[in-house]
Amino acid sequence: MTAQASGKSRLQSPFPDIEISGIGEPLLESSRTLVEFYNSLEKVDGLPRKADVDPFTIPREVLTSCYLLEPEDDYSDWTYRLIGTEIVERFRIDRTGQSLRSIMEKERADELVEASNSVVRTRKMMVYRLIPKGTPMEDFYAETLSLPILDERKDKVWLFGGTFFGSAIPRPVS
């Protein structure tokens, strides 16, 4: 993988009953497909441009699992500008147009805002495993990744990413 992953950590989720744990590198094939697409984009100042993240060029098999997050001018919050239909259907919640701080308690929002800002600072992807709270689900596996992209004016970094689902915990790729 060319896109470098940033460290491991544990976060709260914008979706109910889900915990987030950093895993470093994507394990699911669909996540790796999105990273390959991201790596194929032309870079400006080391990052792809938002304008190049075109739904017509995103691989069809991952398109419905993608999302786009826009930062506030001071990076104090992030707003979902796009959430793929696969994510909406799986979680039964459409967060499009909602900011992290508007959909969760302060502590949880602070964690996710900081994690998002970490992607901006490091300019490296973050990969997380989604873990259902309560009863363990051995046959459930999901991961989400955030990739930094430049806005049209090249003065702000947005996050482009995806959330992907598997039926079991995959083995790490060597």
Image (cartoon, grey):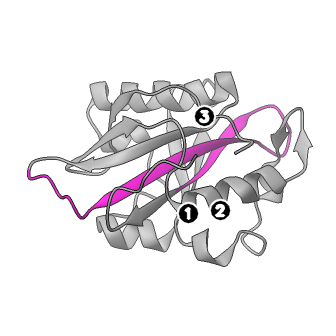
**Left or right: where does residue 97 sit relative to residue 153?**
left
Q: Name the residue under label 3.
A: 5
Type of amino acid under label 3 = Ala
Q: Name the residue under label 2.
A: 33
Query: What residue is drawn where x is 58% and y is 52%?
Result: 161
**In terms of secondary structure, where does tag 3 sit?**
loop
Q: Which quadrant would residue 154 be assigned to in this image?
A: top right
Query: What residue is drawn where x is 61% and y is 30%?
Result: 119
Magenta stretch, residue numbers: 135-162
Q: Earlier in the sequence, mark 1 or mark 3?
A: 3
Q: Label 2 to label 3, Cα distance in Å? A: 15 Å
Type of amino acid under label 2 = Thr
Q: Residues within 10 Å of mark 2 (few under 14, many from 20)?
A: some
Q: Is 15 inside the magenta-drawn segment?
A: no
Query: What residue is drawn where x is 38% and y is 26%?
Result: 111
**Left or right: where does residue 172 sit relative to residue 44?**
left
Q: Label 1 to label 3, Cα distance in Å? A: 16 Å
Labelled disc at residue 163: none
Residue 111 vertical placement versus 3 (above, below): above
Residue 70 vertical placement versus 33 (above, below): above
Type of amino acid under label 1 = Glu
Of the 4 image quadrants, the one containing the N terminus is top right
**Left or right: where does residue 18 sit relative to residue 37?**
left
Q: Which quadrant would residue 44 be assigned to in this image?
A: top right
**Left or right: where does residue 92 sit relative to residue 116?**
left
Q: Label 2 to label 1, Cα distance in Å? A: 6 Å
**In terms of secondary structure, where does tag 2 sit?**
helix
Q: Which quadrant would residue 88 be assigned to in this image?
A: bottom left
Q: Name the residue under label 1.
A: 29
